[in-house]
Image (spheres, grey):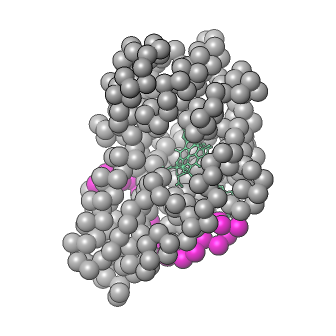
Amino acid sequence: MATILDAENRITAAARDLGFSAVGFARAEFLADEARYAALWIARRRHATMKYMENPARYDPQSFLPGARSVVVVLKNYFPPVRLNLRYKISAYAYGRDYHLSMREDLERLGEAIVRMRPEARFRIFCDSAPVADKAWAARAGIGWLGKHTNLIRKGAGSYFFIGGLMTDVELKPSAPATDHCGTCTRCIDACPTHALTPYEIDAGRCISYLTIESKNPIADEFAPLMEGWAFGCDVCQDVCPWNRFSLPHNDPRYLPLDVWFDPYVVEAAPGSQRRFRRRVAESPLSRISLKKWLNNIENAVRTFPKN
Ligand code: B12
Ligand code: SF4
Ligand code: SF4
């Protein structure tokens, strides 16, 4: 398929209209370096129980969209205007509507905008929803760099962004790569409560985000005293990062705290039925865990909440 004249600018404009704050383009080629680093990470079992990380297709655009030529990557700001004030801490990404749902809607619209420009174009969207390495594509598309805490940072804007994108068979000009601006800083590594970080690498099984969300088990005795009040995810390595001084609050009502965070049944964690819990947390990222897990998380978080 031939290059569309000025397609990159038109796609960028469409993405900005949809509320995305950064847009970049990458060639849909096999992510050879990233696949190699990931294989080493997996060989050391740093992915803990997340078996889906072992899928090599995550680095191959052709297995996601046969005929893919380009990857369009976008960032969505979720930096909260105000932090929730509860008896435990909730990571900012989880305040509002589950981003998997909201991002899907916006990315579908972005794909439709491309099809309006080029009716025969094919596309397939991704946002933590498919065997795709979201961060690697964002870095390839020059939107930012992968910091020592392993999240994508955008110079002058920080890291409180969701990453999403789409692959398409439209040929698009790749964006210039971004450079690393971590320098000699090690704040994230020093601040991590569970010592999950070494430069540019995470030991996922130690990360509070994994322990409170991804892991199905109760928090192990080794980590329970180290939770520093976190009940769902963790923002420590991002909060201490100097680049997040540039974060600006989002203005998307979908990412404002849902009623669930003011619902005494959920917030006070009254033991009840799983069905009732499910109904109340629907559309919140909290729906990703069971009531049993939530009760265990809260217990540990309240016990370790920093005094003053
Ligand atoms: C698995 C996963 C997790 C795991 C593991 C985290 C991780 N760093 O991989 C856990 C459960 C711990 C987790 C936690 C969080 N997550 Co998460 N997670 C993912 C997921 C599904 C896959 C990430 C992945 O591919 N990891 C695999 C490893 C191999 O990749 P890697 O960290 O990039 O590390 C490799 C490279 O750095 C490479 N490398 C090292 N040096 C070099 C040098 C060169 C030259 C090259 C090429 C490569 C290279 O080797 C490393 C392996 O050691 C993505 C969504 C997706 N589908 O992509 C979201 C995602 C990464 N998560 C996200 C978020 C928001 C979070 C949390 C902030 C949530 C929270 N507040 O609790 C935390 C942050 C914790 C942290 N410090 O990373 C966002 C990140 C947005 C951003 N700005 O970067 C993503 C992208 C979801 C999304 N679409 O928005 N997450
Ligand atoms: S999210 Fe928290 S526990 Fe995980 S690496 Fe960052 S500081 Fe450490
Ligand atoms: S805290 Fe420092 S080392 Fe860590 S990601 Fe931010 S700039 Fe890089």
Q: In the image, is residue 255 above or below residue 8?
A: above
Number of marks in the rendered image = 0
Give the percent coordinates (x, y) of residue 300. 63, 19
Q: Residue at x 45, y 54 (%)?
A: 129
- Residue 65's quadrant in the figure? bottom left
Q: In the image, is residue 58 above or below residue 297?
A: below
User: Which quarter shows the N terminus?
Assistant: bottom left
Residue nearer the viewer, 277 or 40: 277
**Residue 12 counted in the magenta span:** no
Residue nearer the viewer, 242 or 69: 69
- Residue 181's quadrant in the figure? bottom right
Give the percent coordinates (x, y) of residue 86. 48, 17
Q: Which residues are magenta?
A: 18-36
Q: In the image, is residue 22 above or below residue 169?
A: above
**Residue 21 counted in the magenta span:** yes
Q: In the image, is residue 65 above or below residue 130?
A: below
Q: Is residue 160 left or right of residue 183?
A: left
Residue nearer the viewer, 276 or 302: 276
Q: Residue at x 61, y 12 (%)?
A: 308
The reply to whether residue 260 is in sight is no
Q: Residue furthest bottom?
A: 2
Give the percent coordinates (x, y) of residue 170. 36, 79
The reply to whether residue 109 is in sight is yes
Q: Residue at x 66, y 27 (%)?
A: 219
Q: Residue at x 33, y 74 (%)?
A: 122
Residue nearer the viewer, 105 or 22: 105
Q: Is residue 266 left or right of residue 205?
A: left
